[in-house]
Image: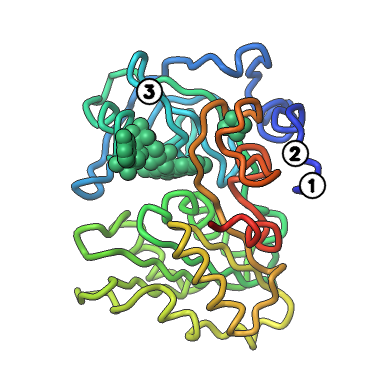
Amino acid sequence: MGLQENTKYGNVWENAQMQPGESGGVDAADIMKPEPHRILKVTHETKAEFTFRVEFPYASKNGQFCMLSIPKVGEAPISISGKGDGWVEFTIRKVGRLTDGVFELHEGSSLYLRGPFGHPWPMEEFAGADKHLVVISGGTGLAPVRTTLNYFYDHPEKIADLYLIAGFKDVSGALFDEEREKWAAAEHFHTIYTLDDSTAPGFETGMVTAHIDKIPFAEFGDNYHVAIVGPPPMMHFSALGCLKCGVPEDKIWVSFERKMQCAVGKCGHCKINETYVCLEGPVLHYPKAKTLFD
Ligand SMILES: Cc1cc2nc3c(=O)[nH]c(=O)nc-3n(C[C@H](O)[C@H](O)[C@H](O)COP(=O)(O)OP(=O)(O)OC[C@H]3O[C@@H](n4cnc5c(N)ncnc54)[C@H](O)[C@@H]3O)c2cc1C
Ligand code: FES
C-alpha cells in the first residue's frame, strides 16, 4: 500500500491493524481501548533509557509504534524497538509524565498498550541482494530502526550491504552495546558510531552529519535507500547532508515524532498542515516530510 492511500481512518486499520495475520485479530471496536500486557524483562540501556520487553501476541511491522499507557497517569506513542515470538520491546527515554511512570514498573507489572499503529519502513523497497541501505540515527532514534537493522543482520542475503551512522551525545548515552558490537563485526555492515564532542573506544567524534560524506553513495548506482531517524533538526540536517552528496530526495525516508493522542486520525493532535502523522507516518518519504519540518 502506498503512502498516499494511507491517509484515511479506515486505511490505518487496514494497513497497520486489520490485515489477517498482521493484527493478530485486534477488533476495530477495541482500537481505543488499552489492554494490559505483562512486562517480561527490563534492560537498563543508559541512565535515562530502559528497554521493556512485554508479552505481545500480535504481529507488527518494522517502524510501527504502540500507544503505551498507565491508567490515571497518561499515554504516549513509543516505537517497537525489538520483537520476537510472543513479545515486543520498547526502548523508552524518561522525559515526562508517562515515561516517569513506566520507569517505576518492573518485571511482572502490567503495561497498557494499544496498537501497533503507523506506516512502517518500506522493507520491500529496502530489501534486495543488490541493494544498499544507509541508516542514520541520532540518540534514542536508534530504537525505531533497531528491528530493521536486526532483520538485515539476520538475513545478509536480503541486502548487498548496510551502512549505519549512529550518533550519541556522549558515551553514557550510547544504546544497545551488545548489538552495536555485533553489527560492527558483521561483514555486510559498515558502522560509524559517533559522539557529539567527545571520544571513547569504538567511537568517532562529531555529529552524524560530519560523517555522511564517508558513505560511498556514488558506488551504489540507483540501488539504495537512506533511512534517517532522530530529533527533527538532526533529520533535517542529515537529509540536507545526503542531498549535498548527490542523494536524490526520493531515496530518503525519515521517521517523524509528533505529539499524539488517538493515533488513528481522529483528534488532530499530530496534524501538521494537512498531514496526520499518525496515519501517514511515522515513516514518511522525504519529498513529503521536507514540507513538514518546523
Ligand atoms: C511515533 C512515535 C514514536 C516514538 N517512539 C519513541 C521511542 O521509541 N522511545 C521514546 O523514548 N520516545 C518515543 N517517542 C516520544 C514519546 O512519545 C514522547 O517523549 C512522549 O511525550 C513521552 O510522554 P511523557 O508523558 O513521558 O512525556 P510528557 O510529559 O508528554 O513530556 C514530553 C516533553 O515535554 C516536556 N514537558 C512536559 N510538560 C511540560 C510543560 N508543562 N511545559 C514544558 N515542557 C513540558 C517534557 O520535559 C518532555 O521533554 C515517540 C513518539 C512518536 C510520535
Ligand atoms: S494522533 Fe493523529 S489524529 Fe489523533
Local SS, label 3: strand
Report the amino acid beneath label 2.
Thr
Using residue 221 as the reference point, say whether residue 42 is left or right of it: left
Disc 3 target residue = 74
Q: Quadrant of residue 25?
A: top right
Quote the CA–CA distance across marks 1 and 2: 6 Å
Does residue 39 lie above or below 138 as drawn? above
| Image coordinates for residue 170, horizontal then vertical, percent | 23, 65
Disc 2 target residue = 7
Report the amino acid beneath label 1.
Gln
Disc 1 target residue = 4
Residue found 70% across the figure and 76% down from its top:
248
Residue found 66% across the figure and 34% down from its top:
16
| Image coordinates for residue 64, horizontal then vertical, percent | 56, 41
Dot 1 crowding, Cα within 10 Å, few <14, some 14–19, many 20+: few
Quote the CA–CA distance across marks 3 and 2: 26 Å
- CB at disc 3 and ligand 1 closer than 8 Å: yes
Q: Are circles 1 and 2 on residues that touch, CB within 8 Å?
A: yes
Q: Are circles 3 and 2 on residues that touch, CB within 8 Å?
A: no
